[in-house]
Image (cartoon, helix red, strand yellow):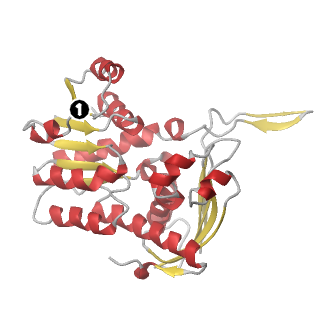
Amino acid sequence: MVKVGIIGAGRIGKVHAESICTRVKNAKLKIIADPFMSDETEAWAKGMGVEQVTKDYKEILQDEEIEAVIICSSTDTHSAISVEAIETGKHVFCEKPIDHDIEKIKQVMEALKKTEVKYQVGFNRRFDHNFKAVKDAVANGKIGDPHIIKVTSRDPEPPSAEYVKVSGGMFLDMTIHDFDMVRFLAGCDATEIYVQSAVLVDDAIGEAGDVDTAVITLQMENGAIAVIDNSRKAVYGYDQRAEVFGSRGMVATANDSLSTAVISNEQGVTGEKPLYFFLERYMDSFGEEMKQFIEAIENNLDTPLGVIDGLKPVLMGLAAKKSVEEHRPVNISEISF
C-alpha cells in the first residue's frame, strides 16, 4: 500500500483525491495540505477517510510514511515543490505544467539525476479511452504511416481575464494538452509551429494580452503534418476530438455524450450535446493516470509520462507564443533549452 500526500485542495486536488480514495486500491491518501484549508474542505477530506489535513505542505514532505506526493498547488509552485519532494526521496506526480520557465524545469530534471524517484506529469488525456484507442490504432499500424493529425479542443466557456493574466495564456494553460496529444498520437516531437490566432470570444482576453481562438499547424519529426484548432467558447459543450489520417486509412474519435441515441422525426434529426466540461469527460482518465503512477512505484516501472514529457509541450507553447508575436513559423529549436 503506497501512502500518498496531496499538496493543493483546489478543483484538481479534489479530483485526484477522489481517484485515490475510490479508484486506486493500492494507495492510501494520508494527508492533504492547502494554505487555504477551510472547515468545509477539512470535512470533505475527513469524509473520504483522509487521516490528516494541514495548511503546511512541508508536513507531507517530513512524514516518513509518505512515499508519494501529488502536486496540485498553483502553477508557480510546481517546480519548487517538485525539487523539495525529490530531495526528500518521495515519488512525485506533478500537475501540468511543471513550470512556464524552462530554467526551472531544468532544475527539476537536475534534481532527478542520480535518484530513483518516480516522476510523472499530469497529462490525463493520454489515458482517455477515446484517445487511447486512436493511439493504439496508429501504434499497431492500422492506418499505416501517419500523414495528417487533427486535434480539436474547444472549451464550453472562456476563463476570466484575471485568470488569463496569470495562467501563461491559452497556449500554456489550454493548448498545452493538445501539444502533448499531438506528440502522443504522432509518436514523435514537433520541429516547427505556425499559429494563426484571433480574439473572437471575449475582448477582455485580448486586453489581457492573450488570444481566444487559434489554428496551429505543426511539422512533425516523422514527416506528418498536425493541425490543432482551439476556441475558448463552444456553446454546445466540451468539444474534444482527434483524427489521424495515414497511408493505409484513418482513425478518428468523436465526443463523449450522455448517450448515443439519435432522434429522427419530422422536426429533424437530433442527438445529445457533448459532455459539458473536463470533470464530466475525463474522470476515468484521471483515475487511470493515478493507477499507473502508483503501479510504477510498486513495480519499479518507468512512469508513462516523465519530466521530458512535461518539458516538450512547454517548449511548444513558448514557440506558439513567439509565432503569434512575430507572425511567422517558429522552429522549436529557437526556444532555448
- In the image, what residue occupies the spot 28% across and 69% down? 103
Quadrant of res 225: bottom right
Who is closer to the viewer here, 189 or 90?
90
Residue depicted at x 14% and y 36%: 59
Q: Residue furthest left?
A: 64
Image x and y of residue 150, in percent: 60, 64
Q: Residue at x 44, y 78 (%)?
A: 332
Q: Is residue 179 visible to the viewer in this orientation of the structure? A: yes
Residue 98 placed where, x, y %? 33, 57
Q: Residues within 10 Å of mark 1 (few under 14, many from 20)?
A: some
Tell me: 7 left or right of 112.
right
Q: Position of residue 268 (x, y in %)?
A: 88, 37
Residue with the most extreme front position: 207
Considering every residue shown, the one lying at the far right of the view is: 266
Report the side of 237 relative to 106 (left or right). Answer: right
Report the residue marked by disc 1: 55
Residue at 39% over, 39% down? 12
Mark 1: secondary structure: loop
| Amino acid type, mark 1 | Lys
